[in-house]
Image (tube, grey):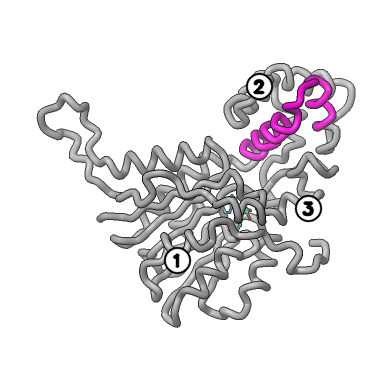
């Protein structure tokens, strides 16, 4: 990892006070920050916990873990670090001989540190290799997706994960260009996308294409579904899950899963009695998602699309 001045690479934690308000119910409890990043939320959680409290910090990105380890050093044994995907929460808890936790936080997506590091390839604003993996030691890279996926698959990814209306045209342009030369950098991809869009919507389309690629490379949506269920399963009664999402695909998954588990019975409404036996597992704490106020957005424009949803385990 390139030597960077620590304070300048910290990601600004979004909705920090609200997260603490919704997440912490027991100051001596065990909590999980499943997307530790550079440790901003984790620091606030650790400050709130008393001597008996404990935090497990998880991140798929080993570079981010190095930064958060340094930042949270002063908390000593109150915090442990795990370089894994949060979908492995059950194994992580087992390895610590832990059965239940008091709360879990998911702050989805990527951090400013990752976005602002050109060699990670997450941003169309700076030139870098088409990588986009959270964990750089494994898995396919964006360069593989862009140069190897058939046109139909590229179209599907841009449509499903980017909700981009020019998906097919962009996929076709990529395939045409890669026949001439392998597409290797964020700038090359950006230029191809821009070449077929002559509207003011360029920036939004670029964000959607880059987002779609990142979701594909990291299998973000399936990881989220697994991680959410694992988090809910691990909670003590009264324990809480907080999720901050940054785009509608993630938010929909969270909202729908919370509603299903808060509803319990899934029998059709015209059934006179319940035959499915479904029990209510959750109580939703945020009927509408909590969003940052104007002051926070002014201080941290990257917070503008954030939505926080919180829920409590009933039984
Ligand atoms: C928005 S950042 C979190 C920032 C953090 N809350 C802070 O205050 O610094 C999201 C983090 O989640 C990590 N991440 C994404 N998907 C993950 C997964 N499936 N498992 C674990 N970490 C993941 C990313 O590597 C990134 O560091």
- Sequence-wise, which precedes: disc 1 or disc 2? 1
Where does residue 183 sit, x and y in percent of width and height?
A: 83, 31
> What residue do we see at 60% from left, 27% from top?
163
- Magenta range is 189-216
Residue 75: percent from left, percent from top: 56, 79
Q: Residues within 10 Å of mark 2 (few under 14, many from 20)?
A: many
Label whose residue precedes the other's in the sequence (3 or 2): 3
Near mark 1 (Cα within 10 A), the count class, few <14, some 14-19 or many ≥20, is many
**Residue under label 2:** 155
Callout 3: helix, strand or loop?
A: loop
Q: Residue at x 54, y 57 (%)?
A: 15
Q: Which corner quadrant of the image does residue 68 belong to? A: bottom right
Residue 78 is a magenta residue: no
Residue 1 x, y percent position in the rendering: 79, 61
Frontmost residue, 166 versus 131: 166
- Kind of element beneath mark 1: strand
Separation of residues labelled 3 and 2 (CA atoms): 28 Å
């Amino acid at each position: 990892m390139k030597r960077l001045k620590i304070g300048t690479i910290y990601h600004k934690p979004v909705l920090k006070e609200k997260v603490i308000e919704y997440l912490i119910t027991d100051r001596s409890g065990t909590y999980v920050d499943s997307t530790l990043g550079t440790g901003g939320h984790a620091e606030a959680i650790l400050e709130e916990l008393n001597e008996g409290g404990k935090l497990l910090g998880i991140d798929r990105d080993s570079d981010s873990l190095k930064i958060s380890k340094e930042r949270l050093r002063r908390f000593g044994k109150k915090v442990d670090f795990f370089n894994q995907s949060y979908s492995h929460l059950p194994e992580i808890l087992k390895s610590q001989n832990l059965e239940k936790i008091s709360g879990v936080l998911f702050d989805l997506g990527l951090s400013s540190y990752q976005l602002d590091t050109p060699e990670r390839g997450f941003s169309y604003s700076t030139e870098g290799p088409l990588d986009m993996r959270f964990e750089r030691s494994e898995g396919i890279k964006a360069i593989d997706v862009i140069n190897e996926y058939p046109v139909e698959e590229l179209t599907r990814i841009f449509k499903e994960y980017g909700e981009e209306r020019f998906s097919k045209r962009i996929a076709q342009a990529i395939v045409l260009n890669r026949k001439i030369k392998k597409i290797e950098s964020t700038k090359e991809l950006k230029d191809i996308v821009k070449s077929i869009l002559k509207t003011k919507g360029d920036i939004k389309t670029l964000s959607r294409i880059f987002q779609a690629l990142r979701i594909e490379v990291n299998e973000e949506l399936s990881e989220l579904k697994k991680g959410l269920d694992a988090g809910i399963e691990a909670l003590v009664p009264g324990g809480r899950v907080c999720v901050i999402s940054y785009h509608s695909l993630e938010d929909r998954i969270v909202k729908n899963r919370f509603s299903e588990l808060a509803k319990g019975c899934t029998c059709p409404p015209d059934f006179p009695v319940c035959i499915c036996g479904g029990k209510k597992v959750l109580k939703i704490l945020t009927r509408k998602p909590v969003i940052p106020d104007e002051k926070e957005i002014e201080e941290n424009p990257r917070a503008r699309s954030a939505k926080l949803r919180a829920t409590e385990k009933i039984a």
